[in-house]
Amino acid sequence: MVSSAALATAAGVKPSQLRRDLAYFGTFGTRGRGYPVEALRNAIHEGLGRAKFQPVIMVGAGNLGRALLRYDGFKKEGYEMLAAFDSAAESLRDRDIPVPLHSTDGMEDFIRENKVQMAVLCVPANFAQQVANNLIQAGIQGILNFSPVVLEVPAEVTVNNVDLALELENLNYFIRRK
């Protein structure tokens, strides 16, 4: 058992706020005793969609794409990288790519057949919007965008942009302020 006070302290919030937030995952705590740890963990994992691996694809298997494909953190957080797609898949076959590599020609069918809803985009800027359009048309609902372009997508599609140069700029700003 773990109390809401102990959890709130660890999270840096008030116990009342923590209890309200946990109520979104169901009612499984006992007043005065707290929460059974295993039931709490399971409820949070289920609520966050982490009870089973979430399928993800990578589009763009260049240097950055291949580096991300070798990143173990995805699996640790519940995401399974099913496959990579690249327009130059044939020339990349001899590279160290830890997932099946396919041509972008079959990407939309793969997405539909495997019920993939998320994609990581690592393509050059001049191809990013068209690739994003193809992903969305195939059923992708979330894109982690490493391409250096702002994508125009429908309101129901979520895009998280990762701009590494901007992150360095942000870091540089805070270093200089010290």
Image: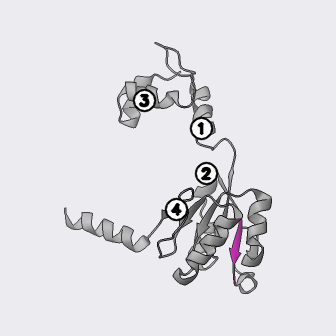
Is the residue 131 above or below the residue 91 in the image?
A: above
Mark 4 or mark 2, which is nearer the start of the sequence?
2
Spatial distance from mark 1 to mark 2, Cα to Cα? Answer: 17 Å
Residue at (61, 28) in percent of width and height:
38
Q: Position of residue 128 (x, y in %)?
A: 56, 76
Residue, disc 4: 159
Q: Is residue 98 visible?
A: no
Q: Are marks 3 and 1 in contact (CB under 8 Å)?
A: no
Residue type beneath disc 4? Val
User: Which residue position holds label 2?
Assistant: 76
Which residue range is magenta in the image?
83-87
Q: Quadrant of residue 168?
A: bottom left
Q: Nearer the viewer, residue 140 or 72?
A: 140
- The residue tagged 3 is 18
The magenta stretch spans residue 62: no
Let me know if residue 85 is in the magenta part. Answer: yes
Residue contact between numbered discs 3 and 4, judged by CB atoms under 8 Å = no
| CB contact under 8 Å: marks 1 and 2 | no
Query: Mark 3 or 4, which is nearer the eye?
Result: 4
The picture quadrant where one finds residue 157 is bottom right
State the residue position of label 1.
Answer: 47
Badge 1 element: helix
